[in-house]
Amino acid sequence: MTEATQQQPPRPAAAGRTTAPVTAPPAGPKKILIVTAHPDPRSLTASLTDFAAARLRAGGHHVQVSDLYAMKWKAAVDADDFPAHAPGERLDVLAASGEATLAGRLSADIAAEQEKLLWSDAVILQFPLWWFSVPAILKGWIDRVFTFQFAHGPSVPPPYSEGALAGRRALVSVTAGARETAFGDRGIHGQLSGVLHPLQHGLFWFTGIAPLEPFALYETVGIPAEGFAAAKQAYGERLDRLFTDEPVPFRTLTGGDYGHDMRLLPGVEAPGTNGPDIHLR
């Protein structure tokens, strides 16, 4: 189900150039990267991916799809990610990834995905919720693609503010077999915003990407045709507002709400606020 690319991403102007534009994307057609993770091309995840790509293209946008299973994506970080790493030398992943990023010597599959990120105005992650997280292959895409000195590090803008990948938006589109009430107020699984906090705040906002409220489908095991039709309508409406909806209002690291120890200053949050919500403006 890998989809043809309508527009190829430009290569960086020079090796080692890793900073992304920090200005808002220009008016007109936008560029969207969809990263999807499910082993079966007949799955609900695959159907939603196809629907999203078609809907966005019908709206005049350019879309690339990274179907990680179809790509046989290697999930584990290892020395092969850094071809210049000397055999037998201790692998310091952070140092090796930073050096390879700045030198333009990352493995070809990582470099290709980074180029897609730099090309994009928005990123959509489409996946089933497995054990309250992303499938391992998608976690591996995150681990390998968001390298030191590309997504964070001293050579790029600071995290939780301008960020290395600022100027982009992100939408998490997730399917779950559980009922919605289990993720709601007093739900046994916890609030969905808390379950997805590592993605929304720890991945996207950390790197400067502005996350939108997630799109979630619940009770998806054996979803009937009429349920899928309703889901597509709701998802289509969210996709139509991909560049107009307000992002999640996370606080910036440089906005005066945090001290030098990167802790929220006392009394900044509204009374009674706790957990991840204290980091919302």
Image (cartoon, rainbow, N blue to C red):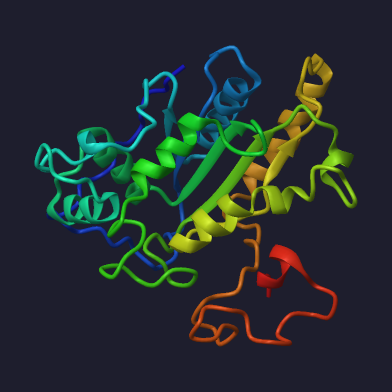
Q: Quadrant of residue 234?
A: top right
Q: Foreground: 86 or 107?
A: 86
Query: Residue at 47% across / 16% down in the picture?
Result: 1
Query: Residue at 82% across / 15% down in the picture?
Result: 224
Q: Position of residue 5 (x, y in %)?
A: 35, 29
Q: Is residue 133 above or below residue 151?
A: above
Q: Position of residue 202 (x, y in %)?
A: 53, 57
Q: Is residue 240 above or below residue 158?
A: above
Query: Residue at 65% across / 71% down in the picture?
Result: 279
Query: Residue at 74% across / 80% down in the picture?
Result: 269
Q: Foreground: 60 or 83?
A: 83
Q: Is residue 62 above or below residue 67?
A: below
Q: Position of residue 159 (x, y in %)?
A: 44, 68
Can you say which quadrant of the picture contains the C terminus?
bottom right
Q: Quadrant of residue 275?
A: bottom right
Q: Foreground: 72 or 265?
A: 265
Q: Quadrant of residue 113?
A: top left
**What count of labels does the image hold?**
0
Q: Position of residue 247 (x, y in %)?
A: 62, 61
